[in-house]
Image (spheres, rainbow, N blue to C red):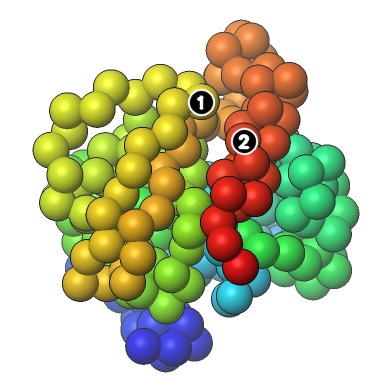
Amino acid sequence: MLLNTLNSALFQCRRCPRLVAWREEVARLKRRAFRDWEYWGKPVPGFGDPQARVMAVGLAPGAHGSNRTGRMFTGDASGEFLYAALFRAGFASQPESHHRADGLTLNDIYITAVCRCAPPGNKPTPQEMANCQPYLEREIEHIQPKVIVALGRIAFDAILRLFGKPPSPTFAHGAVFSLPASSFISHPSSLLCSYHPSRQNTQTGRLTTEMFDAVWRKVRELLDQIPR
């Protein structure tokens, strides 16, 4: 399935009543700082290089970040931290991500999320994540990544479920696991864990700039090991 076909279906999705109500209420009421914005207020598609060897998977759009801008990790503190790191690692054309028309392009990486609609309290339910799982599976099928970066424990667990692996591996920042080929990806791949670049994690020092840069250096090392 082509990504534009997948995204057309995604934009029409209303499978999760709680998320539909929340994303649309946030888009209607807005935050005062963004009162002049026309909020996206719909499911947010993946973003990046359709020929990427790397896929980064986050949790869900932020209410006043991606739910406002319509682009993954764009318009909030998590995105500022992520794209600055991707720029330093050579995966992004610029260190900032403000809106869909800001000129940002990604090279060899595609960014997506477990849940495509902004959830109340940044906490989607297990059923809501299950409803979104087919979109993630189809993206992996199209991209065929060699390395998948799980941004946070929830993304890590969701990827293991998708690949039919028991949640026995312990999530640890910087850990690397092997994923098998499956019905939707034709080759084995590597799963690399990272703490999520949330404001809470970065401001408390749980995830530092040095730690995050090391993740993307590890991605480069894994790519260098793949025969061309």
Res. 24 in view: no
Amino acid found under the numbered disc labelled 2 = Lys
Q: Is residue 1 above or below residue 22?
A: below
Query: Measuring 50% from the left and 30% from the top, which residue is drawn there?
Result: 194
Q: Identify residue for label 1.
A: 174
**Mark 2, other Cα within 10 Å: few <14 / some 14–19 / many ≥20:** some
Is there CB contact under 8 Å for labels 2 and 1?
Answer: yes
Query: Measuring 40% from the left and 21% from the top, which residue is drawn there?
Result: 172
Q: Secondary structure at mark 2?
A: helix
Query: Measuring 72% from the left and 63% from the top, which residue is drawn there?
Result: 106
Q: Identify residue for label 2.
A: 218
Say whether disc 2 or disc 1 marks the residue closer to the N-terminus: 1
Q: Position of residue 104 (x, y in %)?
A: 80, 64
Please give left or right for residue 135 compared with residue 215 in the image: left
Q: Nearer the viewer, residue 180 or 211?
A: 180
Query: Measuring 80% from the left and 51% from the top, which residue is drawn there?
Result: 90
Please give left or right for residue 222 compared with residue 20 in the image: right
Q: Nearer the viewer, residue 35 or 191?
A: 191
Q: Position of residue 120 (x, y in %)?
A: 36, 40
Q: Position of residue 110 (x, y in %)?
A: 57, 62
Res. 113 in view: yes
Q: Is residue 2 above or below residue 94?
A: below
Q: Position of residue 13 (x, y in %)?
A: 30, 75
Work out how far the residue at label 2 is from the one at label 1, CA to CA, in angstroms: 8 Å
